Every structure is written in structure tokens, then in C-alpha cells.
Amino acid sequence: MGRAPCCDKTKVKRGPWSPDEDNILKNYLEKNGTAGNWISLPQKAGLRRCGKSCRLRWLNYLRPDIKHGGFTEEEDNIILTLYSQIGSRWSLIAANLQGRTDNDVKNHWNTKLKKKFLAAQNSYNNNSFTNNIDSSHDFNHNCTRNYYGILEATCSIVDSNTFTSHMDPNLTNSSFQFPLPSLMEIQENDAISSVQEDGYFMDFSSGISSSYYDNLVNDFDFQEKFIGSDPNYSSSSSNSTLIQLQANNIADFDQSIKGFEN
DNA sequence: AATATGCTCAACCGCAGGATT
DNA sequence: GAATCCTGCGGTTGAGCATAT
């Protein structure tokens, strides 16, 4: 047996709401609330509308705390960050934005942010990263995640007066971005990159997916250097596995980082 | 000025799942 | 336990507006 429709569609009004209807709904809800039942609300309020339509109109437009107007850059960043972590869970994303509804966020994503997001991903993923480190130099190194979910690494060459780039003699420090194949595969702060005296390392103390691992090893020419218990994360009840990957090629590091310069 | 195309966003739809009968 | 009700959610649609040709 099929599900009964929530209302008789031949007897309710559809389409855009008039100012009068808005007033009736707003006044009724401010006085009475929903009383826990949207389906019976339109009849009580004197509206020829489906209960679902009333609910949507209230939640997405009439509620007093709704913020109308364009999204700020900060809001964009929050949406992009959360989308990279949880996907299209619009209601959860909207819950992190004061005064925004899931419908607003979804529309904004579909019309503006999706293109921005995909363009950024394609741009990073099309760059092949050859991870070459000149081990004769000392680097300060730092990794953060930007709001596209891309891991950004910044290398500063500490002993810059001894460093000579083949591509650019003036290059003493730079930053590059390390594309992630999938935004959901590594949790924030799981990857700790480091430049050590014998090469470029990425350590994963918890949760590296097999596809990301394969990507590092095959596409980016990393090799497995160490796999075992991580002393920094072990406790009496559990141990974490440490996977350490080392870059194979050392030769053209300055060329690589120049290619990923901001 | 007229028409085509693209964009925005309010509204609708169907489904999932929890609550109630 | 099954049937039904209701809410909330994400995907989609289409009217209206803006811009390009």
C-alpha cells in the first residue's frame, strides 16, 4: 500500500507566497507556535496551503533570525571546509552559520561555490608533484589544510645563503600545495610532513586510506620507510600505527617547489 | 529593441526514519 | 510487530531577472 499524500493537492494553493499569506502564517506562528503539527496548521491558521509548504516558508524565509543577502567570505570558507569534511549535509553545514538555512547554503553552493571548489581541485590534481628534496639544506616545514581541503605545505630554507636554485638563483624559500586525491580520506592533523636530513617524510599516525597510500607511492614516488607502532600515540589501552613515507627523488626539488609557488 | 542564454533562489518532490497508533 | 503519521532532508524544478548577442 502506498503512502498517503500529506494533503489534497487539488485543494491547496501552490507556488509563490503572497505578502498576505506570509502575514497570516507569521502572526499565527508567533501567537500559537506549531503545536507540534504542521499538517493541521494551515487549516487552523486559515491558509489554503500544504503543511509542508507552511513549514518550509517559515523555516526558510519568515523566521525572525533568518539572515538574508549575500554570503561573506568567512561564510564561504566555513561551507567549503565543512563540505570537504562531511559532503552535502546542508542542514549540518547551515547549523554552523548563524541565520542561514540549509536551502540557502545549498543554493549558494550550487550556484557559486561548487564551481570554485571543483576548479580548485582540478587545478591542484592536474599538477604532478615530484617530491624532490635537496638533503644538503635545512628546511623549516609546516603543513596546514586550506578550505578546499588541500594540504598546503610551506618550506622555508633556513640556510638560504648556501642554497642555490637552478631555476631561480633568488629563490630562498617558497611554499607549495600538495593535492589530496579525496577530501575525506585523512582527518585534520593526521598527516605530519617533515623534512629531515635524509629526505622528505610524511607520517601518518592514524588513518591513511589505501587509495591515498597508493597515490603517494605510485604517483608521487614515495616509498614506505617505516610501519609500526607509534610511540607518541600509544597508551595502555591502544596503540596507533605509524606509517612513514619517504620521497625517493632528491634531484629537482627547487624546480618542484617553484612549480607550486603561490 | 528583440531574442537567447545564463543565473538565482523559492518552492516542490520523494524518501528515510523516528514517533505514534 | 505492522501500519500510519509526521518531520526533516537533499535533490530538482521552474519562474523571474540579468546579461549577452
Image (spheres, coloured by chain):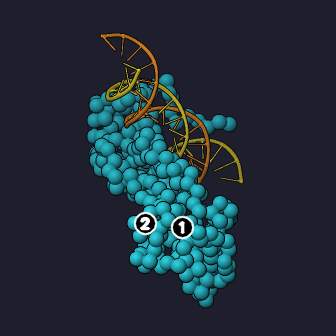
Chain colours: A cyan, B orange, C yellow
Query: Which amino acid type corresponds to the residue marked 2 in the rendered image?
Result: Pro
Q: Which residue is found at the position 68% from the left and 36% from the top?
A: A1
Q: Do the dots labelled 2 and 1 sit on one chain?
A: yes
Q: Quadrant of residue A241?
A: bottom right
Left or right of A49, for residue A5: right
Q: Can you tell which of label 2 and label 1 is closer to the viewer?
A: 2
Query: Which amino acid type corresponds to the residue marked 1 in the rendered image?
Result: Phe
Q: Position of residue A19 (x, y in %)?
A: 28, 31
For the residues bearing labels 2 and 1, Cβ distance under 8 angstroms: no
What secondary structure is found at the residue carrying circle 1?
Answer: helix
Report the disc number at residue A215.
none
- Residue A92 seen in this snapshot: no
Left or right of A109, for residue A25: left
| Crowd around label 1: few <14 · some 14–19 · many ≥20 (10 Å) | some
User: What residue is disc 1 on?
Assistant: A253
Read off the chain for label 2: A
Cα–Cα span, label 2 and label 1: 14 Å
Front-lying residue, A254 or C2: A254
Q: Position of residue A75 (x, y in %)?
A: 36, 53
User: What residue is disc 2 on?
Assistant: A169
Q: Position of residue A56 (x, y in %)?
A: 41, 41
Q: Quadrant of residue A227?
A: bottom right
Q: Position of residue A97 (x, y in %)?
A: 37, 55
- Residue A100 seen in this snapshot: yes
Farthest bottom residue? A236
What secondary structure is found at the residue carrying circle 2?
Answer: loop
Q: Which residue is found at the position 49% from the left and 24% from the top?
A: A10
